Amino acid sequence: MAIITIVGSGMMGSALAFPARANGHEVRLVGTHLDRDIIDNCRKCGRHPKFERDFPSGVSYYRIEEFETALEGADAVIGGVSSFGVDWFGDYVLPKIADGTPVLTVTKGLYDTADGYLYTYPELWAEKLRALGKSLPLCAVGGPCTSYELVAEDHSSVSFCGYDIEAVEKFKSLMACDYYHVSTTTDVRGIESAVALKNAYALGVALTVGLNQKKFGIDSPLHFNSQAAIFTEAVREMDMLLRMQDAHSVNNLAVGVGDLYVTVYGGRTRLVGILLGRGLTVDEALNELKGVTLESLVVAERVARAVKVKAARGEVDVKELPLLMHMDAILTEKKPADIPWDSFTYAE
Amino acid sequence: MAIITIVGSGMMGSALAFPARANGHEVRLVGTHLDRDIIDNCRKCGRHPKFERDFPSGVSYYRIEEFETALEGADAVIGGVSSFGVDWFGDYVLPKIADGTPVLTVTKGLYDTADGYLYTYPELWAEKLRALGKSLPLCAVGGPCTSYELVAEDHSSVSFCGYDIEAVEKFKSLMACDYYHVSTTTDVRGIESAVALKNAYALGVALTVGLNQKKFGIDSPLHFNSQAAIFTEAVREMDMLLRMQDAHSVNNLAVGVGDLYVTVYGGRTRLVGILLGRGLTVDEALNELKGVTLESLVVAERVARAVKVKAARGEVDVKELPLLMHMDAILTEKKPADIPWDSFTYAE
């Protein structure tokens, strides 16, 4: 049995303790400096404050000051920070991990450069490691898997990606169990782009829910035709953006689309999309949600910014991405939601 | 303004009266011999018995015996029969329509031959017309659009396809309105295959709902990870089957996937999938639903049968279509649902 150290006790990082324990591994869950209350709660009653089930026995809990202790003898490390912890993870966490230890991260997102390149986080971290002369096999997980339902042992199917296929396969052997099904690939950019993009497009689907609340009344039943129209356009635009990332494959598209399916059902992205759809500006919507910063909004803005840079060079045509451009107008120009339905139609 | 005759007063055919009337056309709704009660109800109170809104004024109602009257001066005909009326539509309806009149059908399905070819219905009808020496520009509509929500004027985005692009564009000009958004294409096999396939895969997603009711209790909350895992596999298999049909394009896949998104939410396919997931055999499930015949089950069986014929010739590998093959085992070998989760994973 192995020792697996999870850094970041947010929901997804913490949820991975369940399949790890199902396979009998020792799990050490380390909270970041933002996670003190979570770790205190886990120590007191063996449960993550957002989960409806106790952790299995065999999970121990560490504060960030105890990180080095939690790393002692670790066979593998899982990074459970959100995209707002990307730099901290690269600057503080990765340098402390022993060379050669495989690392799997759950962080979702893309980072754009001035010349319109969209980096995945494993690419960013790999650059940092190269500068440090450090060698860690970086892997990442993508695919449709919410933490609640992983904890509930609902069947979940995900993709582990990494540059070093042996490390990827090691993580699969550590984590896959009868309810956690794992594909493996070296296509890091493909998986990471696909699952970042779905966060942006989940916002688009949620817009229709709010627009319908405005049109039909706040307690009107959900309508699915308009959601599905956006979903259709999202498939088309995600396909195009994966091609723009030189990362298109049927598997990548399917993972991104499946992840979109599970993402539109809940969470804060749905909430903010509904508020925007009802007619609030983005500032009003975020104020309503007490100024929370959302990964989905960040990734939509970044992807749109990269697209516009590439479009200025004639490499893409923004007319082919009307949903992304409309979300960008909502987010950066503070425009009201007004979905350009007819721009989604095609003639061929 | 045009005269549009709709043959078949099922829900989808009838719903198309709404955008047609939004554009000011005269609409004549003709019930088949199965639709007498519907037509009687419409005549009495101006409402389809399954809709929550009255028809707009300007719609008139005909029994099948009055079909010829309803066709007099018609500028366009819409076929609103289900796939169980395909032969009747070809043998009885099409021959009565004046040569050159454009026809748009809502019928979804595929028909397999002994050598594993999957015909779309417009292909079948075109053969009948050729035999009769008759010329009708056949068009069809596919895409995510449920009748209820079209009637509710929820934004809906569909694709009209046909061999004669002028007829397709004529239908778009007749039907597109501020809430009904229409793409146009000559790729009949692509659109018709995509939207038939989604009926089969909607059954797969619904299986997980029933399996979870068995595992977690019949009133347990919905779980989405497992639905999304099936959805992901469905995208992959639909992509492959569209290629098998020589009908792959991003637009076709997006239309099929978007249509899958809206189809999993309701209707009898979902019900039968849930019953199968709970552990009933297909005969028990259909008995529970009073022996109703479902298009989704028929199309799943036909596609699987065609795949097996092609596989025997070495043209496809059934191992690449594990979800379809499992649904086929449930439907034709009467096996219990037991989703082969790990067969959906890939290594690349």
Image (cartoon, coloured by chain):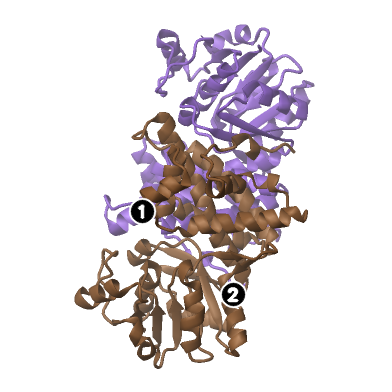
Chain colours: A brown, B purple
- Height in image: A83 above or below B219? below
Q: Nearer the viewer, mark 1 or mark 2?
A: 1
Name which residue lies at 39% across and 55% down: A291
Identity of the amino acid at label 2? Leu
Name which residue lies at 60% across and 50% down: A235
Query: CA gap, disc 1 to disc 2?
Result: 30 Å
Q: Secondary structure at mark 1?
A: loop
The spot of residue B251 in percent (x, y) is 67, 45
The local crowd at label 1, few if under 14, some if 14 to 19, many if 20 or more residues have their Cα within 10 Å, is few
Camera-side residue of B324 and A179: A179
Q: How many marks?
A: 2
Q: Earlier in the sequence, mark 1 or mark 2?
A: 2
Provide the chain ID for the residue under circle 2. Answer: A
Q: Are marks 1 and 2 on the same chain?
A: yes
Q: Which mark is residue A124?
A: 2
- Height in image: B328 above or below A78? above
The spot of residue B33 in percent (x, y) is 51, 17
Identify the residue at the far left of this view: A44
Name which residue lies at 55% across and 13% down: B64
Residue A46 in view: yes
Name which residue lies at 56% across and 55% down: A300
The spot of residue B254 in percent (x, y) is 61, 47
State the residue position of label 1: A290
The local crowd at label 2, few if under 14, some if 14 to 19, many if 20 or more residues have their Cα within 10 Å, is some
